[in-house]
Image (cartoon, rainbow, N blue to C red):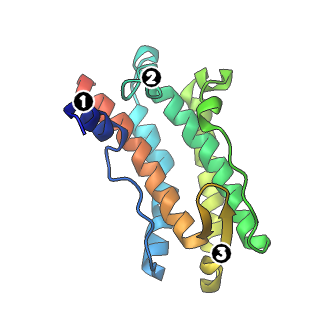
């Protein structure tokens, strides 16, 4: 890997890439739910005070802008909430994928970030309520992801806790590099 590709990779993954855990405990589930519940405040905090010009700055070369990252989090986590409901109410459902890169180019991804911050707060509040209602055996339920295969709901939980941290870190890194 060249130095340039290594630095691009570091910008792409400011925290380590997601690694699916083997065994998760009740404490792990609780910690991940708390992360999901806290993520909207973390997103709100990391974009606080940014101008439109700053929000429209990409976090890495050929990457999304900070604004697109915020809207992507709302898009992704709305989908995730539905995926958990499907996994809880159906037997090994196939969950729908979507072209997130195309969604990030749609006109609503240029909207004020406040819209998606409000969506994130609402969906994460409801999502956390749902997750806290799980019986221990519910975490072993599975969904089929067309690209990743069978996934237990507890692994999906760990992924989305990571996903919020991952994208918050993108914007933190952008702010740090630019002295914002």
Above-or-below relation of 33 to 25: above
> Which residue is under mark 2?
55
Q: Is residue 140 left or right of residue 15?
A: right
Local packing at callout 2 (Cα closer than 10 Å; few below 14, some 14-19, many 20+) is many
Q: Earlier in the sequence, mark 2 or mark 3?
A: 2
- Quadrant where the N terminus sits is top left
Q: Point out the frontmost of discs 2 and 3.
A: 2
* Outermost residue to the front: 1
Mark 2 and mark 3 residues within 8 Å of each other at the beta carbon: no
Label 2, label 3: how far apart the Cα atoms are: 36 Å
Residue 105 image offset from top left, x and y in percent: 61, 24
Q: Point out the frontmost of discs 1 and 3.
A: 1
> Which residue is under mark 1?
4
Residue 159 image offset from top left, x and y in percent: 50, 60
Residue 176: quarter of image? top left
Q: Secondary structure at mark 1?
A: helix
Residue 167 image offset from top left, x and y in percent: 43, 42
Q: Is residue 76 left or right of residue 87?
A: left
Residue 170: quarter of image? top left
Q: Nearer the viewer, residue 112 or 87?
A: 87
Residue 29 image offset from top left, x and y in percent: 49, 73
Q: Is residue 93 left or right of residue 136?
A: right
Q: Secondary structure at mark 2?
A: helix
> Which residue is under mark 3?
133
């Amino acid at each position: 890997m060249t130095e340039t590709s290594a630095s691009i990779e570091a910008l792409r993954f400011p925290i380590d890439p997601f690694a699916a855990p083997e065994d998760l405990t009740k404490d792990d589930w609780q910690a991940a739910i708390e992360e999901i519940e806290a993520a909207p405040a973390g997103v709100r905090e990391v974009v606080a005070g940014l101008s439109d010009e700053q929000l429209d700055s990409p976090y890495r070369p050929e990457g999304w802008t900070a604004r697109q990252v915020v809207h992507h989090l709302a898009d992704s986590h709305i989908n995730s909430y539905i995926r958990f409901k499907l996994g809880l109410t159906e037997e090994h459902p196939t969950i729908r994928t979507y072209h997130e890169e195309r969604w990030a180019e749609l006109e609503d991804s240029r909207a004020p970030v406040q819209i998606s911050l409000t969506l994130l707060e609402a969906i994460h509040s409801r999502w956390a309520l749902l997750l806290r209602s799980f019986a221990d055996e519910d975490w072993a339920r599975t969904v089929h992801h067309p690209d990743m295969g069978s996934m237990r709901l507890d692994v999906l939980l760990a992924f989305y806790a990571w996903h919020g941290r991952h994208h918050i870190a993108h914007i933190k890194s952008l702010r740090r590099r630019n002295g914002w």
